Image (cartoon, rainbow, N blue to C red):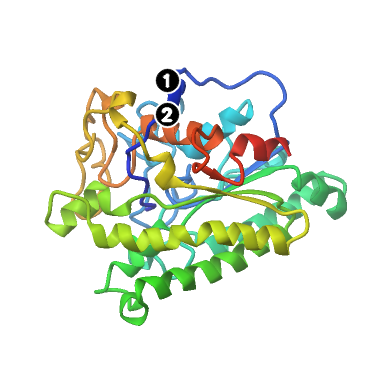
Amino acid sequence: MGFLFNIWIFVFMGLVRFDMQFVLGAPQVPCYFSFGDSIADNGNNNNLPTIAKANYPPYGIDFPDGSTGRYTNGRNIPDFIAQLLGFDNFIPPYATARGQDIIKGVNYGSGGAGIRDETSFQQGARISFNQQLQNHGRTISRISLLHGGPTSAKDYLSKCLYTVLIGSNDYLNNYFLPQIYSTSRTYTPDQYAEVLIRQFSQQLKTLYNYGARKIALFGLGALGCIPAVIDSSGGTTCVDSVNAAVQIFNGRLKPLVDDLNSQLVGAKFIYLNTSSIQSGDPTSLGIQFFTEPCCQVDSSTGLCISGSTPCCNRTQYAFYDAIHPTETVYQAYSVRAFYSVLPSDAYPMDIRHLAQL
């Protein structure tokens, strides 16, 4: 399960309130590929032997196709990004993408995925970032057959958008589970962040070598403020030690973007600063409940209990289960990542400007 963004999000001028429909006309990029954990997953975990899956009610209660495997009541971040880019359909999960579908993009996200391969192993099967990159390599081979060979395919892929939403599980399903993982005994928070960044850098270079050029990296949210973490600490407020460790990792993402853009010819990496995007007054979105899950949750997993009845006022809740935000929060975050409000929201540019390059 991907663990995510704190919900202190403000979007200017009520922008998040418009009813986002798919835009008629050509999309801003020819294809969109998404990598990540449960924040991105739209069905890749459905048939895996794992507790990290969400392909049952009440997940998807507000999604057109019902319970698809998205860990929320409706759309997730890649769904909103696809809409903002102008695609006429949601990007399909790798597990079911077939034929010409892959030409417009693929979603590789997997609940439980991490930068490190061992992350979340206690939950069962998951598709780590390394495995997602391997799957992307297979997709590119198929695109080459459909698109006139490797050279033509690489030129095509260089115009596409790529988003990466990963790293949360490397903390909450690894570093902060000392009874299962040794990482917190092996590394200080500073050392662990550096280890993650080094591996992340190599993975992103692999993505670049596959032809990706326009790549948006999402920072991690205040993981110490999600309901499951607060509850497990036995307290009622955010867990500062978790937030502090995450911020060390986030602080290395902007320099990482600079390094990759300077080292790799034609690379256009950007960093989306979750801490900045979270700034503001969440009540402006109509949110009134910040730490209570909208659905009834299983205390052992933090996920919704199958078949349970969720709250009826879902737009007023920040979290759908004890881990994952509601569609309202995902929409707010996606819009502000796409159209940055503050200079600190995105570096060196937002997704809208990246897509236009």
Q: In the rendered view, would you say 187 is above or below 350?
A: below
Total labels drawn: 2
Query: Is residue 352 at least partly visible in the picture?
Result: yes
Label 2 element class: loop
Residue 267 in picture, x, y percent from top left: 72, 54
Q: Which mark is residue 90?
A: none
Q: In the rendered view, would you say 184 is above or below 337?
A: below
Query: Mark 1 is on which residue type?
Result: Gly
Q: Are marks 2 and 1 in contact (CB under 8 Å)?
A: yes
- For disc 1, the marked residue is 14
Crowding around mark 2 (Cα neighbors within 10 Å: few <14, some 14 to 19, many 20+) is many
Left or right, residue 2 beside residue 310: right
Q: Residue furthest front?
A: 343
Most foreground residue, 331 or 129: 331
Query: Mark 2 is on which residue type?
Result: Val
Query: Is residue 123 at least partly visible in the picture?
Result: no
Quarter of the figure with residue 283:
top left
Quarter of the figure with residue 328:
top left
Q: Residue furthest bottom?
A: 186
The quarter of the image holding the C terminus is: top right
Quarter of the figure with residue 200:
bottom right
Left or right, residue 226 beside residue 195: left
Residue 248 in picture, x, y percent from top left: 40, 63
Most foreground residue, 284 or 23: 284
- For disc 2, the marked residue is 11
